[in-house]
Amino acid sequence: MIYPIVIYGSQTLRNKSVDIAPDYPELKKLIDDMFLTLTEASGVGLAAPQIGKNIRLFIVDCTPWGDDDPELADYKKVFINAEIYEVSEETDLFNEGCLSLPGLHEDVRRPVAIRMRYMDENFVEHDEEFDGLPARVIQHEYDHLEGKVFTDRVSPLRRNLLKGKMTKLANGKYRCAYKTK
Ligand code: NI
C-alpha cells in the first residue's frame, strides 16, 4: 500500500522515535510499502514518522542520482535503530526539500561525513562511514527520528522569512502531487 505522507504541523513529526525489535509486526511489508510510497512521491528518503509511525526506521533511495554517479545507480538502503556517533568537522551546504514540507527548499549546512551504527532490514548490525549524497540524505532522515525537520537547521533570519509558508503548511494550505494527511 502507498501511505499518505504526514505534513508539517503534525505532532508525529515532532516526537522522538523509539527503537524497534526484530519481531516488529510485518516489518518486511512495512519496508516494501515505504519504498512504494517514496517512489510514488519521487523522493530520495523517507522516515517512519512521515507515515505516522514514531519508530526508528528510515529508507534512502539515491538512484535518481544514478545517471550522474554510477555508484548510486542501485543505492537503496534500509536503516533500523540507527545511531550517528561521529560527524566530520567539515560541513557543506546543500539545497534540501522534504516530502513533509511540500514547496519548501532551503540550503542546509551539515557535516559532509558521518559514522553510524544501524541494523539493516535483516537486523544485521553495521558500523559504517557515509559521505557525499548518502550522508546528506541519511542525516536529513535521521533528524526525522529525533523530531526535527530541515527548516530547524536554517538561520533564524531565514526561518523567520519562511514562517508564513510554514503556517500555511500547518493549516493544510498547500498543493502536492502525492497523497498526504
Ligand atoms: Ni524529510
Image (cartoon, rainbow, N blue to C red):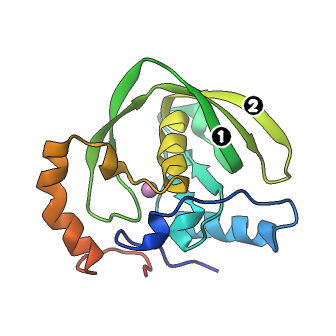
Left or right of 170 on screen, residue 22:
right
Q: Name the residue beneath numbered marker 2.
A: 127
Vertical arrangement, residue 120 with respect to residue 175, above or below: above
Q: Is residue 45 visible?
A: yes
Q: Is residue 175 visible?
A: no
**Mark 2: secondary structure:** strand
Q: Name the residue beneath numbered marker 1.
A: 83
Classed neighbour count for the residue bearing mark 1: other residues with Cα under 10 Å, few (<14), some (14–19), many (≥20): some
Identify which residue is drawn at 39% across, 54% down. 149
Question: Where ligand 1 lies, by image quadrant?
Answer: bottom left
Identify which residue is drawn at 36% across, 26% down. 92
Q: Position of residue 6 (x, y in %)?
A: 45, 73
Which callout, 2 or 1, points at the residue further toward the start of the chain?
A: 1
Q: Position of residue 130 (x, y in %)?
A: 60, 29
Q: Position of residue 89 (x, y in %)?
A: 45, 17
Left or right of 70 on screen, residue 125:
right
Classed neighbour count for the residue bearing mark 2: other residues with Cα under 10 Å, few (<14), some (14–19), many (≥20): few
Vertical arrangement, residue 10 with respect to residue 111, above or below: below
**Mark 1: secondary structure:** strand
Residues at discs 2 and 1 in contact (Cβ within 8 Å):
no
What is the spatial separation of the Cα atoms under label 2 and label 1, in whole angstroms?
10 Å
Left or right of 89 on screen, residue 37:
right
Residue 171 or 177: which is nearer the viewer? Answer: 171
Identify which residue is drawn at 60% across, 66% down. 54
Q: Position of residue 138 (x, y in %)?
A: 55, 42
Task: Select label 2 or label 1 by which is in front.
Answer: 1
Type of amino acid at the residue the image marks with label 1: Glu
